[in-house]
Amino acid sequence: MYRDDNGGPGTAPAAGAPVKCPLTKKDFESDQDVRWCPGCGDYAVLAQVQKLLPTLGIPRENFAFISGIGCSSRFPYYMQTYGMHSIHGRAPAIASGLKLARPDLSVWVVTGDGDALAIGGNHFIHAMRRNMDLKIILLNNRIYGLTKGQYSPTSEEGKKTKSTPLGSIDRPFNPVALALGAGATFVARATDSDLPHLQGVLARAAQHKGAAFVEVLQNCVVFNDGAYESLADKTTRDNARVLLEHGKPLVYGQERDRGIRLEGLKTRVVQLGADGAGESGLLVHDEATDDGALAYLLAQLGGGDAPVALGVFRSIEAATYQERNAQQATAVRRAKGQGDLGALLRGGDTWIIEQQ
């Protein structure tokens, strides 16, 4: 995209015309001071989104960022786009309404593990189920940061916080598994510490037509520092993660000497070269399977000697909710003609209240 001489949106120049300046990351940076704690992982996500948007070929005025409540929900303030800092947990509902009213917009939701999966749980799963054409980024730091350190729906069992001084007895949500179970057509996971990988995942999500969900494992330096240390430390992360690549076997490790094998309905870590184990016998990632069962298995990886899976778990094509809604509305107008809202409102029983 391009901007005109006044910094506003422009179009690609015609042959022989003066060249306009292409949009850059700076064009998507607002004049608001970014107010997150120093070292917060939110900075990395914000920077990668601001770098990505100029590459998408979408006018700046056609982006909208919607958030709920939480540290991550400050995001719209820092984007030089349209947006709304909405109410707790309701960002997917508000974003869905905006997308239905303005299907031409690129609508993004930025949320946190508490905002999306506690009070906003139903809104989140139904946005996935309906295949709303939204880009949903969930920043998962496994804690309530804005309200000063209570446990969240993704906090691990036994987590001691201000609201669970004896340790949490809740089983945590797995956001990727939840999105897959709700029928999301694009599901991915990345970390805030591997910027090239995060940028690639966000770019894939931006190009997807339909509900695109990205979980970002993100550090909270104040209330849950080091939650993903093994994935962030460059000396340990290659042994702690497996990067998903469509059509390729699941190989990982600093020496690329470990792999994931499927045995029945269970995954097992194997040492390559040991007991005849080779890449030919490893599980091959397929992000395009219709049922999503393989993606769901991979979402459960992690813990013990198993690595955490990162990358795109599922990416399939399916009709979006706004497409189905438009088709239905067109069919009804053809059959019954253009509706009359006034007639609809007066069509039932009415009363006139007269002053005595």
Image (cartoon, helix red, strand yellow):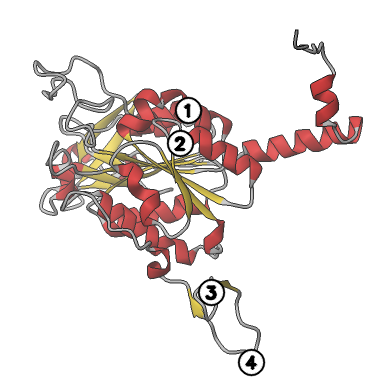
Of the numbered discs in the image, which one, if any, rests on residue 123? Answer: 1
Q: Residue 323 occupies which quadrant of the picture?
A: top right
348, above or below 40, in the image: above
Bin the neighbour count of mark 1 within 10 Å (Cα to Cα): few under 14, some 14-19, many 20 and up: some
Viewer-proximal residue among 260 and 289: 289
Q: Residue 227 occupies which quadrant of the picture?
A: top left
In what element is the residue under mark 4? loop
Marks 3/1: CA–CA distance? 36 Å
Marks 3/2: CA–CA distance? 30 Å
Residue 197 lies, in percent from the top left, at 31, 55
- Residue type, numbered disc 3: Tyr
Viewer-proximal residue among 42 and 345: 345
Q: Is residue 296 left or right of residue 346?
A: left
Mark 1 touches mark 2? (CB < 8 Å): yes
209, above or below 128, in the image: below
Label whose residue precedes the other's in the sequence (4 or 3):
3
Viewer-proximal residue among 77 and 165: 77
- Residue at which label 2 appears: 91
Marks 4/2: CA–CA distance? 45 Å
Picture residue at 45% right of the left edge, 30% below the top: 124
- Residue at which label 4 appears: 16
Picture residue at 79% right of the left edge, 23% below the top: 345
Can you name the residue that lies furthest to the top here?
Answer: 356
- Residue at which label 3 appears: 2
Label whose residue precedes the other's in the sequence (1 or 2):
2
- Residue type, numbered disc 1: His
Picture residue at 63% right of the left edge, 52% below the top: 104
Mark 3 touches mark 2? (CB < 8 Å): no
> Which quadrant: the C terminus?
top right
Label whose residue precedes the other's in the sequence (3 or 2):
3
Q: Nearer the viewer, mark 4 or mark 3?
A: 3
Instruction: Look at the image and tell me whether residue 319 can be seen.
Output: no
